[in-house]
Amino acid sequence: MQNIAVQVAPGVEPAQAMVEIERVIRREHGLAPGVDNDFTVVDRKQFLATQQQTTEILSFLLAGIAGVSLVVGGIGIMNIMLVTVTERTREIGIRKALGATRLNILTQFLTESIVLCVLAGCSHGSRCRAARALARFAGWQTDVTADSCCWRSRSARGGAGVRAVAGAACREARSDRVLRHE
C-alpha cells in the first residue's frame, strides 16, 4: 500500500488527528519508541502552502525577467533616438537658420519619439495576444491580460525613449552652430 487518504471528521482538530494517525501506524508497523518513522503523515494544507509559495516565487522571477526585458527595450529605443538626433544636426541647423525655436526642435523630436514608442508598444500587444493563446492552448491557469503586460511595457519603453530624446534634442537645440556639417 502506497498511500492512505484520511478525512478528518467535523469538529476534530487536524493536528490532533495527525498525531493519532501517526500513533496507530507506528503501532501497526511495530516501531519501538525512539525509532524513526518509515512513513510520513502529510496534511494537504502543507501542499497548498508549498504550491502558493512556489507560485509567488515564480511570479517574482517572471516580474524580474520582464523588468530586465523592459529596461533592455528602453535602452534600445533610447540609443536609436540618440543616434537619430545626433545624426540630424544639419537639419536642426537649417531649421534654426530658418527661425525655429528650441521648443519647435524639441517638440519635433519628442513627437517622433512618442510615435516610435507607441509603434513598439503595438508590436508588444501582438506578443501579449500570442502569450494569451499559448496559455489557453497549453491549459495553463494563467490570465494574460492586456493590462498585465502591454501597458507597463509601453510606459517603460516610452519613458526611456522620451528621456533620451529630450536630453539630446535640448543639447542640440541649445547649440549655437547653424550648420555643423557641409
Image (cartoon, grey):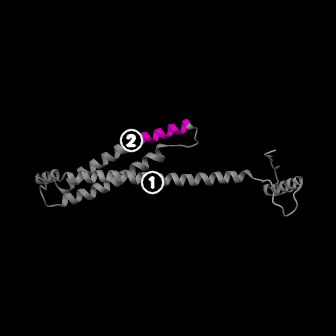
Foreground residue among 95 and 89: 89
Question: Which quarter of the rendering shows the N terminus?
Answer: top right
- Identify residue type, mark 2: Ser
Q: Local crowd at mark 1 within 10 Å, few (<14), some, or many (≥20)?
A: some
Q: 146 above or below 107?
A: above
- Identify which residue is drawn at 46% across, 43% down: 146
Foreground residue among 102 and 77: 77
In the picture provided, is 177 more to the left or to the right than 6?
Answer: left
Q: Which mark is residue 67?
A: 1
- Identify which residue is drawn at 21% across, 55% down: 103
- Identify residue type, mark 1: Gly
Q: Position of residue 62 (x, y in %)?
A: 51, 51
The range drawn in magenta is: 124-137
- Identify which residue is drawn at 68% across, 51% down: 48
Q: Position of residue 29 (x, y in %)?
A: 87, 53
Residue 95 covered by magenta stretch: no
Q: Give the structural element (helix, strand or loop) at label 2.
A: helix
In the picture provided, is 143 more to the left or to the right than 122?
Answer: right
Query: For residue 176, what is the image quadrant?
Result: bottom left
Q: Position of residue 131 (x, y in %)?
A: 49, 41
Q: Position of residue 25 (x, y in %)?
A: 85, 53
Q: CA distance from mark 1 to mark 2?
A: 18 Å
Q: Give the structural element (helix, strand or loop) at label 1.
A: helix
Q: Which residue is tagged 2? A: 123
